[in-house]
Image (tube, rainbow, N blue to C red):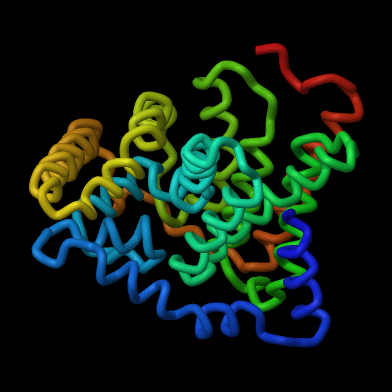
Amino acid sequence: MYLPFIFLLIFSSINHLDLHNFLAEKFLFIHNHCIQLTPFNSPWQWIYRSLLCGSSSPSNISLVQSMKTLGLYHLLVISGLHILSLEKAVSFCCRRNKALTLLSLFIFCLACQMRPPVTRAFLALLINYFQKQRKLFWSPVQRAWATGCLTLFLFPEWWSSFSFLLSWAASLLISLPIKRPLIKITFLYLGLQPLLLSFSPLSPLSILINWALTPLWILWVLPMSLLGLVPPLSPYVDKFWESLNILFSALTDHFFLSATASPSLPFSLSSAWIYLFLLFLTLGLWEILWKKPYFSF
């Protein structure tokens, strides 16, 4: 049921087709329709377009700046966690029909113009379904690595995409089978810091803030974005975004976390890829040594 997706993508890639541009152009009408559904009179229209349609977020908006400073933007948006929460909701609505669920999520990817983080997260679901049906018993780290390799094979131009690289690194760290959310967030935050130092300051407070606000983001932000598409509800959803902006701005100001406090540490893309490979080797070594879940936390 999901194999046609994989075979179609691999066939297109083997035939030297620019798959990303091909899909983005052929299904541009889905993205445009998504844009048209967003409330035009809302001052938070960019949020709907960013989360639901894959449009770029304006960097000069205070909410975006606060999220980047607090570490929420890169940890939660780039990681593709929102499509995982969407998958659970769609699966429930489709009565766990995998084919219908994957088709719905593929349409969502097309609406987002096949952005690297969303596409990688979607392919991760395909690989997970595939290995379960074939009883391959791949570990979470192996699935995360295989997903990244498949994505890079299908879209080789993303070799120069930092958002894809960051999304791949986040998926490897999220795959750690750690039960305690605070410890999991800590490993995720620290593991991404070598890649994020040029974007947000390193602060232990960011770990606590991410731990406290991650459930809010996963459980509320995407559902509220969908509710905002309903015209009568849009003004009420705008109040939610205003409250979120006030909360994030207050946290940023109170803890003196500012984007200017971040050290500007230039790094080459090749260095980032080397770090990603070393991260995979480290997690793989952990898996071999422990033979069971890496931690009992």
Residue 140, given in percent of the width and then of the height, sits at 75, 36
User: Which image quarter is the N terminus in?
Assistant: bottom right
The residue under the point 26% across, 65% down is: 37
User: Which image quarter is the C terminus in?
Assistant: top right
Decide if residue 42 is on the left or right side of residue 148: left
Residue 8, given in percent of the width and then of the height, sits at 75, 72
**Picture layout, residue 80 above or below residue 179:** below
The residue under the point 36% across, 68% down is: 55
Decide if residue 100 is on the left or right side of residue 56: right
The residue under the point 44% across, 50% down is: 77
Decide if residue 283 is on the left or right side of residue 227: right
Q: Is residue 112 visible?
A: yes
**Picture layout, residue 19 above or below residue 105:** below
Residue 23, given in percent of the width and then of the height, sits at 57, 78
Residue 67, given in percent of the width and then of the height, sits at 32, 46
Q: Name the image quarter holding residue 159.
A: bottom right
Residue placed farthest to the top in the image? 296
Query: Looking at the image, which is closer to me, 232 or 145?
Result: 232
Q: Is residue 281 visible?
A: no
The residue under the point 14% across, 37% down is: 243
Q: How many marks?
A: 0
**Picture layout, residue 285 above or below residue 32:** above
Q: Name the image quarter holding residue 155.
A: bottom right
Query: Looking at the image, which is closer to me, 207 or 41?
Result: 41
**Picture layout, residue 138 above or below residue 1:** above
